[in-house]
Amino acid sequence: MEPILAVLPLVMTIIRFSKSNATDCALQGESTYPQLSKDGDIIVGGIFPFHSKWENTNLSYSVKPSPIQCKSLNFRAFQYSQSLIFAIEEINNSSSLLPGVSLGYKIYDTCGTTALGVRMAMALMNGNENSALEEPCAKPAQVQAIIGESYSSVSMAVTTTIGPFSIPLISHYATCECLSDKRKYPSFLRTIPSDYHQSRALAEMVRHFGWTWVGALRTDDDYGNSGMAAFTEVAQQLGICLEYSLPFFKTYSRENVLRIIEQIKSSTSRVIVGFLDNFDLQILISVFLEHNITGLQWVGTEAWIFDTQLATMDNHKILQGAIGLAIPKTKVTGLKDFILNINSLKTAGEAIFTQFWEALFNCGYTKQNYSDDLPVCTGEEKLSDIENTFTDMNLMPIFNNVYKGVYAIAHTLHDLLGCKDTCPTKKQPDPLTFLEHIKKVHFRTKMGEDIYFDENGDPAARYEIINWQTRKEEHVFVTVGLYDSTFSARNRLAVNLASVLWAQNTNQVPVSVCSESCPPGTRKAVQKGKPVCCFDCIPCAEGEISNLTDSIKCEQCYQDYWSNPQRDKCVRKQTEYLSCEETMGSLLTALSVLGAIMTVIIGVIFFRYKYTPIVRANNSELSFLLLISLTLCFLCSLTFIGRPSEWSCMLRHTAFGITFVLCISCVLGKTIVVLMAFRATLPGSNVMKWFGPPQQRLSVLAFTLIQVLICMLWLIISPPFPFKNLNLYKEKVILECGLGSALGFWAVLGYIGLLAFLCFILAFLARKLPDNFNEAKFITFSMLIFCAVWITFIPAYVSSPGKFTVAVEIFAILASSFGLLFCIFIPKCYIIILKPEKNTKKQLLGKIQTK
């Protein structure tokens, strides 16, 4: 109905203006007259909802629709009107602003409807009188600008209508973000911040309190729908989810309201964001009480958060603890007294004043307006005897917005009329010129407040954060914080949590989340089919951490670090290498030192008895060289123990390779000597001259030099190096010696194996030679042990992890060294120490003769 009625006046206006050159120019439609008015040189218009309800008209399209019947006087609109009148009277009495120019006003009732809002705006533009015949219809608008409307939907319709004529509409209470679009609403300005900022402030405030799972109720009009859309957009950016977002309007049916109630009762969120006007919320409170919906935490907009009438109705404290945004408190000197002095209303409009008086004092002047229960108005009633919405000054910031709008008009006129000590002209400026200048106006009020409009026609956004608290069974509005959009993002919001009383009169911030926060060490995983605020907490995998609450992913630790058991911190990985401080390392160290000591002791014994037959008969020179090489073999195993370094990595493999080749070369030399000695005893054999001591030394040197050459090539081409093995264990770093060239390593081992195998074959062939001159049997056993150790070493070396690889290599060195030492030297030491009677030449020769 409203859109249709809203279009009719606009169509009539267009028709009228299209006949600007016609000789017959008359008012089309019924005349409408202002509720409050006063003449002046320049007229300021006003449109306010003097009534808060109306009766719908049945549109049958067969008869002319009857006028809308407005009901239920809205005392707030009278306060707004008084604020406008006060500002105009103050300006008219000023000697510095518009001197010599009087401002008048015409204030109409919109009844809060779009249709009447447009109609009254057109009446302000056109006037109500019938023009004289032959007078052109085209003429300046009746008003310079219009103050109003309170509702965003009405303001949108009005500014769409008057925008083409460049008549400014300056609203004190219409906050819809959509009105900032200058392409659609080029003549709209306001002295209240846009919901663009309020929506963001509400979302930031909700996130500040840790609420990520909230419900929302909105008025089903442009104000509520646009504001909630902006809030939802910012809320999503801040990680807030809406469990529900329900529209409501005062004309909704009982069934629609019950559906809303059921949705709220079945929800799990404990916070409701209300983008509602006070009249809609008044209806909802009664329904909430009927269904016993209490204890919810409300978050409100400036439309209702500091409305005393709403607080008075909330007897059961359904809104107790509500928190929201309000226009900062202010005080306009003299305005309160002027509002409460209602004589100015009587002077400005007798008809509306009578209705106002009857509603204010709950009495009647005529029999139609009072009953047996309603007293007769005497005209002597006093405001001091009553307490209602009209006497409540809590909306002083909104009254101030009306006041600032009137002064913006006055300052613009002052500049355009060229006023100084006096105004040289009282002619109304061209509407387009006036509109362009008022957009750029900048002045300071008598309270010291800077007033200006940005490129969207909006003022700077500043809010107080209001908390509803109960004191002595009454609601009290307490300022608990501030929000200023001109500050940086980090400093916009400031709340004193200690002074807030929440729902159910508690000091604890209510909890409203779909899922509890994920602690450090876990990450959020969204539950399938649910909003992002509903999630499971998944522990981070090994090697990953999250050190923040509600992390959306786990971070991988750097290579040298690993996650602690709690998965909330990366700690340096434990480094592992074979150390002499641990049991295995100390045992191997002890065995190495013991082997070296035993070898030295045996060497000392052999040196002490070097002239005895058993020492001399077994090639004492090679025996001493073999003992020295065995000592080096035992000692070189120590280079494998400890933290790997560049020198230890190069030394351990090369020293091991060279000393073992020296050792095997000596054993090979002794084996060849045994074979050659036996062949030398045969008649006509002259073989020993080809394998005397010089040749033995030369063979040992030659075999060893080959290994030295292999090691040198290995060190030159690609030497062993220390490195961190990060792949073997995820939680540990294995410090190892890289082989560098694997070919070099296996060449060293292969050459040792070749010599050992050759030695084993020769010793095996000589094992049945006479015992007196035969070491071959013991060498065979030693080489058998040696080969067995190193054959088993290869698979054990390849498959052993970490430090056990090094331990296997040390064990192989020690086992083969002890094998050589025990098999070759221990039997001789036994004879030398314990059986000295067998260590004689006669005994040796006697054995030969016996055999």
Image (tube, rainbow, N blue to C red):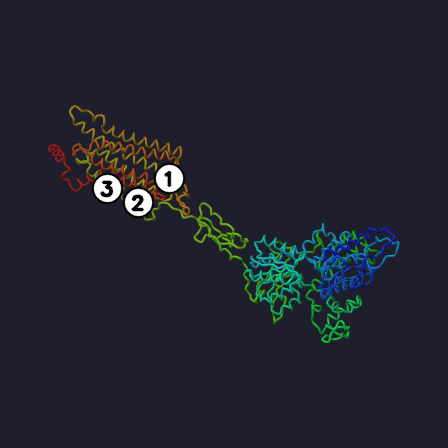
Kind of residue sitting beneath label 3: Ile
Q: Residue furthest left?
A: 850
Q: Residue 348: tell me if it is visible.
A: yes
Q: Quadrant of residue 392?
A: bottom right
Q: Residue furthest top?
A: 684
Mark 1 or mark 3, earlier in chain? 3
Where in the figure is residue 711, as x and y percent of width and height?
Answer: 35, 33
Q: Quadrant of the N terminus?
A: bottom right
Q: Quadrant of residue 717?
A: top left
What residue does disc 1 label?
649
Kind of residue sitting beneath label 2: Leu
Q: Quadrant of the C terminus?
A: top left
Where in the figure is residue 687, as x and y percent of width and height?
Answer: 20, 25
What residue does disc 3 label?
601
Horizontal arrangement in the rendering, residue 618 relative to residue 58 (left or right): left
Q: Total marks drawn?
A: 3
